[in-house]
Image: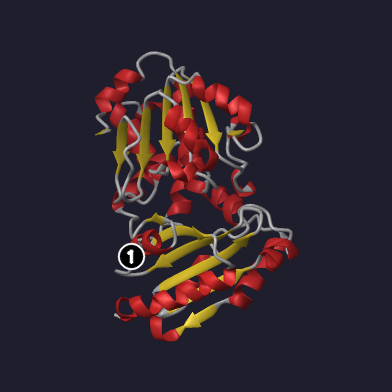
């Protein structure tokens, strides 16, 4: 693997190719936004382009132009395999380790098409022929803008690309609140707005499209919120029965972990979500300051991500994983109390 030289990729793209774009399992706004932004760019360059997601993604993203062509690997395995095995190039976006694509992992490992990684998470694996990795970026969608610009095709930016990339940027920076939102980020957003997007409408479609069931689930989550004052930590639990009682839909728990972090004095927040069908508990961590939840999750919860935002999972029961978390806080309490 080598770091991406934009002239090399430009050379790879100078004739029509069959390209497949793959985001991570349980795609979020940045995964779908970066994939669609890249898709709309490649279509203009006359490449035959497909997006294959490992599994379904939230409804609040399905208004984006191009979502109708996205192939769900879980529901259309054979079609996805055929497209992958005929690909000339494979772009992986918003992840840097193949375990992050679930059942697609073995297929990509055996696929000989050159792979190009575009990602902003820490500690990338060595699976790609070319890697564009920048852990200082607040989102992969911002990186897609720079990718297009560095290749010399900024004149191809259009409303469809801009809407997708803006969606990815705004969701992964928590509406520009996270520390990795930089002046460059805002400059990129200004360029995207100049493409004719309606940023207010995008925010409404993402954040103001809650179902009544999701609001009920929020109430349950807040009722379950626990604060561990001595460690400046907070956590939320959601059991499968609680999810079922609110007719849970993918995306309904998006952002709930941030409620814990919004409490004055809290420096670490977590949410533990039971998933009976997969036999796991899904975990999200958020932190403020110097507490590194990427390292914390990698070491203890089979996950990772960024310094202040990470995910994880466990096959322990909901009760046991919460007990483990509380036990680990005693070892990390010093850094959280600073």
The mark tally for this picture is 1
Compared to 200, does 67 lie above or below?
Answer: above
Task: Name the side, left or right, on which 244 lies relative to 109.
Answer: right
Between residues 163 and 216, which one lies in front from this camera angle? 216
x%, y% of residue 154? 35, 30
> As drawn, which residue projects farthest toward the bottom?
230
Between residues 141 and 110, which one lies in front from this camera angle? 110
Compared to 97, does 78 lie above or below?
Answer: above
x%, y% of residue 183? 30, 52
Residue bearing mark 1? 292
Q: Quadrant of residue 90?
A: top left
In this view of the protein, can residue 22 be seen by the observer? no
Between residues 202 and 18, which one lies in front from this camera angle? 18
Quadrant in which the C terminus appears: bottom left
x%, y% of residue 244? 73, 62
Q: How is the image coloured?
A: secondary structure
x%, y% of residue 40? 49, 29
């Amino acid at each position: 693997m080598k770091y991406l030289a934009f002239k090399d990729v430009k050379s790879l793209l100078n004739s029509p190719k069959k390209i497949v774009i793959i985001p991570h399992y349980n795609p979020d706004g940045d995964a779908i936004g970066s994939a669609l932004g890249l898709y709309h760019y490649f279509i203009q360059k006359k490449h035959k382009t497909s997006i294959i997601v490992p599994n379904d993604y939230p409804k609040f993203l399905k208004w984006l132009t191009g979502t109708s062509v996205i192939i769900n690997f879980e529901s259309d395995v054979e079609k996805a395999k055929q497209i992958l095995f005929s690909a000339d190039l494979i772009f992986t976006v918003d992840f840097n380790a193949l375990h992050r694509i679930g059942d697609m992992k073995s297929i990509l490992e055996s696929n000989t098409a050159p792979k190009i990684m575009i990602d902003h998470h820490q500690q990338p694996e060595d699976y790609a022929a070319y890697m564009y990795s920048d852990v200082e970026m607040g989102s992969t969608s911002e990186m897609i803008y720079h990718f297009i610009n560095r290749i010399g095709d900024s004149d191809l930016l259009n409303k469809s690309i801009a809407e997708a990339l803006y969606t990815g940027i705004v969701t992964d920076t928590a509406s520009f609140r996270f520390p990795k939102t930089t002046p460059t980020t805002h400059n990129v957003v200004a360029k995207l707005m100049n493409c004719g997007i309606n940023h207010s409408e995008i925010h409404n479609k993402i954040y103001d499209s809650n179902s009544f069931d999701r609001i009920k689930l929020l109430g349950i989550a807040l009722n379950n919120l626990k604060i561990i004052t001595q460690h400046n930590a907070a956590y939320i639990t959601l059991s499968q029965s609680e999810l079922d009682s609110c007719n849970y839909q993918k995306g309904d728990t998006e952002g709930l972990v941030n409620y814990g972090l919004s409490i004055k004095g809290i420096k670490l927040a977590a949410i533990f979500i039971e998933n009976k069908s997969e036999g796991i508990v899904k975990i999200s961590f958020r932190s403020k300051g110097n507490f590194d939840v990427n390292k914390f999750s990698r070491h203890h919860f089979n996950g990772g991500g960024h310094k202040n935002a990470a995910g994880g999972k466990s096959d322990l029961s909901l009760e046991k994983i919460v007990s483990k978390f509380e036990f680990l806080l005693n070892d990390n309490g010093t850094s959280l109390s600073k």
